[in-house]
Image (cartoon, rainbow, N blue to C red):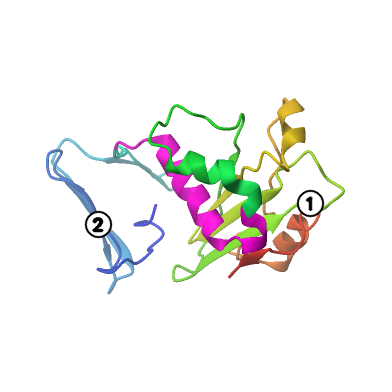
Amino acid sequence: MRTFARIRGKNGVPTLKSEAAGWRIEYDDDKNSFNIDHREGDPVFAVDPDIKQITLRLKRDPYTPIEVLKAFVKMGLSLMPESEIEYFSECIAWIREADNSNGFIRNLSVIYTVAPGAMPNDKITTRVLRRRAEYSNIPYLYFVLIYGNEMFQVMLPSPTHDQALNELEDETAGWKPTQGRGEPITSKAASDEILKFFLTKVRGR
């Protein structure tokens, strides 16, 4: 997604490629477009001119899901005020554990949202949100990461404050932005929706 969202790294927008399969997808900064090369007779994409849609057939690199989750949680903890850290000692121990079979908490929620349209590709937004006192059926803290067209909402588990969640069968609530095409995720409408459940940000930028 970083390539198609034109998220720049140290060496510019990353290029997707597979030398073994013989394909390459590269962003052309001068033309503001993508160049796709592939072997003849073995394309990595299909074009449907009737609905003006291109479908890419790419294989994802191998990864360990629980380690990705730990990385998200670690980012959230790094933004947390020191006054909250004492409630997350079990969470910190879980991150440090080499054994990834320890699930630590049941139904740890991650909500992934893709916003349509053109979005700023040079900004990263992070938030740590604390729930309002009148709610107990949602996580105590959420870490929110937004970049390009993607948004991740990750529960930061605290056994001290999330006891009520153990009795719930349904997926815990997050917030879903309701912006129209091309409107930034961080719009006031989305922010108002967040505050139905959460206090203003604990920390973020």
Q: State left or right for residue 134 relative to residue 194.
A: right
- Residue 56 image-quadrant placement: top left
Dot 2 surroundings within 10 Å: few (below 14), some, or many (20 or more)? some
Boundaries of the magenta span = 62-85
Is 69 included in the stretch rendered in magenta? Answer: yes
Number of labels in the image equals: 2
Distance from label 2 to label 1 (Cα)?
40 Å
- Kind of residue at disc 1: Phe
**Between 189 and 75, the one nearer to me in the picture:** 75
Q: Is residue 97 visible?
A: yes
Q: State left or right for residue 61 relative to residue 190.
A: left
Residue 174 vertical position relative to residue 102 in the rendered view, above or below: below
Looking at the rendered structure, the secondary structure element under dot 2 is loop
Which numbered marker is on residue 45? none
- The residue shown at (67%, 50%) is 141
Q: Earlier in the sequence, mark 2 or mark 1?
A: 2
Say which of marks 2 and 1 sits in front: 1
- The residue shown at (80%, 41%) is 136
Name the residue beneath numbered marker 2. 15
- Give percent across and percent down for residue 203: 63, 66
Q: State left or right for residue 124 relative to residue 169.
A: left
Name the residue beneath numbered marker 1. 197
How would you classify the magenta stretch by its main secondary structure? helix
- The residue shown at (42%, 31%) is 100
- Give percent across and percent down for residue 107: 61, 31
Marks 2/1 in contact by CB < 8 Å: the verdict is no
- Give percent across and percent down for residue 104: 55, 32
- Kind of residue at disc 2: Thr
Looking at the rendered structure, the secondary structure element under dot 1 is loop
Is 79 included in the stretch rendered in magenta? Answer: yes
